[in-house]
Image (cartoon, rainbow, N blue to C red):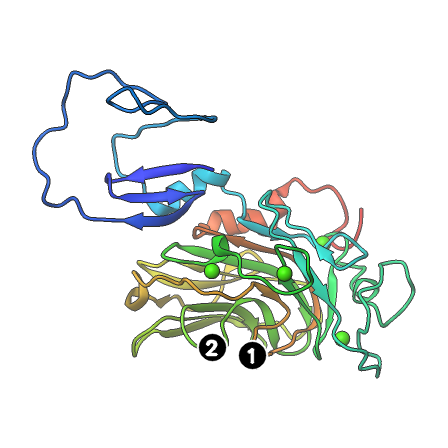
């Protein structure tokens, strides 16, 4: 667990703001003749019992984005590579272990995905077989009918809220590779379209679109790309959410679409109790096509960082699609 403190009044744990309070009535200097100590209190009676590492002090105010960056060195807070090629577990490669449960729906038949299956099964009713040629190695195929992935922290095949994936008051980035010819949800944390929700989808016009809903009359905010996605090719669809500024969509590593101001919800606490889903939101919107390499960052990527994610850091050695 990493703890950070800003202005003496704002606590961050694991890169996420938890508590804050005002110290505006306190004035004067904090100069004193005491030594600097780690692991015990000023009265020298309360001793820490455990491990402490990497203690840092800054003589300026760290922004939430800087703290989030320092927590995981710029890596995503959740990252589903969808390379497993079999089974019902989508592992989280961020290191945070927010694994997903893969659900193929019921046995609707009619050529739809009825099983998770495996990449080499040869069964065209398998999510893994139909997604075997991913953007990077394998992907998952979704049938647009009843397939999804959701965060499942206790491995009981039911969907669970992950508090660390609540946007709270953080900036945010959501990104995934998609291959489709129709509208559908890509990544969502959406308690049925009420409040404090967000989702990334391919809208009915075939654009990569992001929507957030807070509270208040001007709190339903969306923007989308001008580029459309209904060509059946792999595209990188992403959005950044800068709470004090704007939302911006990206296509294939480039800014695409008009940034929209979200200052009306800049301080609202997006704290909900629903799971993160790939391929649907709670209200439906089933995705029809393939999804790969879905990521969430608890800060807003810069345009340069987004380009790096699109190019996979420009260090991948292998074909443009599928397995090396
Ligand atoms: Ca299905
Ligand atoms: Ca993959
Ligand atoms: Ca569960
Ligand atoms: Ca929550």
Q: Position of residue 290 (x, y in %)?
A: 71, 66
Q: Which of 276 and 63 is in front in this view?
A: 276
Residue name at image x 64 percent, y 53 percent:
99
The answer to which quarter of the image holds residue 125 is bottom right
Q: Quadrant location of ligand 3?
A: bottom right
| Viewer can see residue 250 | yes
Q: Which mark is residue 249?
A: none
Along the line of sight, which residue is nearer the eye, 118 or 184?
A: 118
Give me the residue at 36% from left, 49% from top. 18
- Cα separation between marks 1 and 2: 7 Å
Residue that label 1 marks: 283
Q: Where is residue 108 in the image (x, y as percent from the top left)?
A: 80, 82
Q: Is mark 1 in CB contact (under 8 Å) with mark 2?
A: yes
Residue 83 image point, x, y percent:
75, 52
Residue 167 image offset from top left, x and y in percent: 43, 58
Neighbour tally class for label 2: few under 14, some 14-19, many 20 plus, Cα within 10 Å:
some
**With 277 as the anchor, is 69 left or right in this view?**
left
Q: Which mark is residue 193?
A: 2
Look at the numbered disc 1 and give the secondary structure of its residue. loop
Q: Which one is nearer the viewer's eye here, 265 or 256?
A: 265
Residue lying at 70% horizontally and 77% vertically, measured from the top left: 146
Q: Is residue 37 above or below residue 242?
A: above
> Residue lying farthest left?
28
């Amino acid at each position: 667990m990493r703890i950070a403190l800003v202005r003496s009044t704002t606590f961050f744990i694991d890169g996420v703001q938890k508590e804050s309070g005002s110290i505006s009535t306190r004035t004067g200097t904090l100069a004193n003749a005491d030594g600097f100590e780690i692991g015990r209190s000023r009265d020298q009676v309360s001793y820490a019992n455990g491990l402490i590492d990497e203690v840092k002090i800054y003589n300026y105010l760290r922004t939430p984005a800087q703290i989030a960056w320092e927590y995981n060195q710029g890596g995503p807070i959740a990252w589903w590579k969808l390379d497993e090629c079999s089974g019902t577990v989508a592992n989280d490669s961020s290191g945070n272990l927010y694994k997903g449960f893969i659900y193929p729906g019921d046995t609707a038949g009619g050529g739809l995905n009825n099983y998770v299956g495996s990449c080499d099964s040869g069964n065209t009713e398998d999510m893994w077989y139909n997604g075997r040629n991913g953007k990077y190695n394998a992907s998952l195929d979704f049938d647009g009918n009843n397939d999804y992935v959701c965060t499942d922290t206790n491995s009981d095949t039911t969907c669970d809220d992950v508090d660390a994936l609540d946007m709270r008051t953080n900036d945010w980035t959501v990104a995934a590779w998609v291959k489709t010819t129709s509208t559908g949800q890509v990544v969502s944390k959406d308690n049925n379209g009420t409040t404090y929700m967000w989702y990334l989808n391919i809208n009915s016009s075939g654009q990569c679109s992001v929507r957030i809903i807070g509270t208040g009359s001007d709190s339903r905010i969306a923007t989308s790309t001008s580029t459309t996605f209904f060509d059946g090719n792999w595209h990188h669809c992403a959005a950044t959410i800068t709470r004090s500024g704007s939302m911006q969509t990206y296509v294939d590593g480039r800014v695409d679409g008009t940034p929209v101001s979200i200052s009306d919800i800049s301080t609202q606490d997006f704290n909900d109790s629903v799971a993160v889903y790939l391929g649907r939101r709670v209200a439906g919107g089933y995705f029809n096509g393939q999804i790969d390499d879905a990521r969430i960052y608890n800060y807003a990527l810069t345009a340069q960082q987004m380009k790096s994610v699109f190019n996979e850091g420009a260090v991948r050695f292998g074909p443009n699609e599928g397995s090396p």
